[in-house]
Image: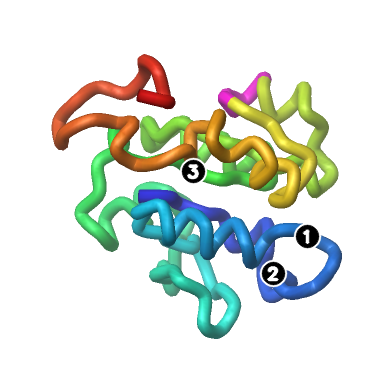
Amino acid sequence: MTVISAALFGTDWWQPALPGGAELLRECAARGWTVVLTGPGPAGAPALTVADPGGDPVRAALELVDGRPSHAVAVAGSVRDVRAARRAGVPCVALAAGPDTDQELRAEGAVEVHRDAAALLSVLDDSLLARPRAFGPAGAATGGALNG
């Protein structure tokens, strides 16, 4: 599953402020990810939504779909979102579209940092979001090659 911070996108998925946002949602879904937004998302998005994620949005998203941290990737837009992923034990891809710097996002635990959703899309095959089967069968540990 993919946990995407709705705070990063809010209702602006379809606006130029986040190039590639809508396409990222569609591509993750097309690759077999169960996409969960941690708050209200755009109408018609190929995603489930955690209506009230509270203070622990990544764990709330995992609970929504009975997901396991070892089979999830979070897409974060802030240091706060990266911390939430780390607390839940979920690897995190960050988009530096907000005020936090690449260095701050990495220091908090982001495995990858991309300028925005369009930049992530351009390297999606080499990212943690390449495809869910990269994580292996249920119960398998994370890590290892992502292109196998």
Residue 134 vs 23, above or below: the answer is above
Q: Secondary structure at mark 1?
A: loop
* Residue 120, position as x, y percentages in the image: 67, 42
- The residue nearer to you, when weighing 126 against 72, is 126
Amino acid of disc 3: Ala
Q: Position of residue 131 (x, y in %)?
A: 40, 41
Residue count near mark 2 (Cα–Cα under 10 Å), binned few <14, some 14–19, many ≥20: many
Q: Quadrant of residue 65?
A: bottom left
Q: Which residue is mark 2?
A: 13
**Residue farthest along the bottom direction in this orientation:** 43
Q: Is residue 136 magenta?
A: no
Which mark lies nearer to you, 3 or 1? Answer: 1
Q: Give the residue drawn at x 62%, y 62%.
A: 23
Q: Is residue 144 left or right of residue 64?
A: right
Query: Which of the marked residues, 3 or 1, is nearer the chain's N terminus?
Result: 1
* Residue behind mark 3: 74
In the rendered image, the residue lying farthest to the front is 148
Which label sits on residue 18? 1
Instruction: Tell me what residue is drawn at x 38 percent, y 37 percent.
Output: 88
Circles 1, 2 touching at the beta carbon (< 8 Å)? yes
Q: Quadrant of the C terminus?
A: top left
- Residue 38 percent location from the top left of the image: 49, 61
Residue 55 visible in the displayed image:
yes
**Any part of residue 60 in sight:** no
Q: Is residue 48 above or below residue 106?
A: below
Circle 3 Cα neighbour tier, 10 Å, few/some/many (<14 / 14–19 / ≥20): many
Q: Main secondary structure of the magenta part?
A: loop
Boundaries of the magenta span: 107-111
Q: Disc 1 and disc 2: Cα gap in Å? A: 6 Å
Compare marks 1 and 2 and give the one earlier in the sequence.
2
Q: Position of residue 107 (x, y in %)?
A: 67, 19
